[in-house]
Image (cartoon, grey):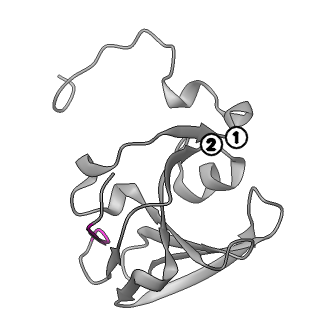
Amino acid sequence: MGQGNWTGACLCGKCTYEAIGEPEASLICHCRDCQRASGAAGLPVLVMRKSGFSADGPIRSFSSIGGSGRPTVRNFCSNCGSLLFGLPEHAPEIVTLYAGTLDDPSHFKPTFAQFTCDRYALSGVGLALMEFAGRAQ
């Protein structure tokens, strides 16, 4: 991934964010904390420097113990509930953007997955599934 501006928003559009610079990492996290927070089998995460990050809107925070065993603060829209970004206590210099909220998620290219010991069939990995480009008929 190259240098640039990474912008995103919540589902209702009231919360927005921007991160400037080159990502530190891009991954999919399968830890139980991310699964519960996102309601999915894994959470696509873009790791950015906090110094180039800004956010605006009615953002609320929730702190819980993350996969590191230390608190992480997850930030979400207080209007629609979209999970937007995280601030892990174990690495105060970074912000974790949840890639599903990127304005252009096609630029997200994960390079690794972590906590794969917690990955399960909900992820669809290794399953022979029928696929549909749009809504299933």
Helix, strand or loop status at disc 1: loop
Question: How many labels were placed on the picture?
Answer: 2
Q: Position of residue 117 (x, y in %)?
A: 74, 32
Which residues lie in the magenta part? 4-11
Residue 34 visible in this rendered orientation of the protein: yes
| Residue type at the position of mark 2 | His
- Labels 2 and 1 touching (C-beta < 8 A): yes
Task: Specify the principal SS of the magenta part.
Answer: strand
Label ID, residue 102: none
- Label 1 sits on residue: 115
Spatial distance from mark 2 to mark 1, Cα to Cα?
A: 5 Å
Q: Residue at x 22, y 63 (%)?
A: 103
Residue 72 picture quarter: bottom right
Q: Nearer the viewer, residue 52 or 57?
A: 52
Q: Position of residue 25 (x, y in %)?
A: 50, 54
Q: Position of residue 69 (x, y in %)?
A: 83, 62
| Residue type at the position of mark 1 | Phe
- Residue density around tag 2, few if under 14, some if 14–19, many if 20 or more, within 10 Å: many
Q: Residue at x 52, y 30 (%)?
A: 123
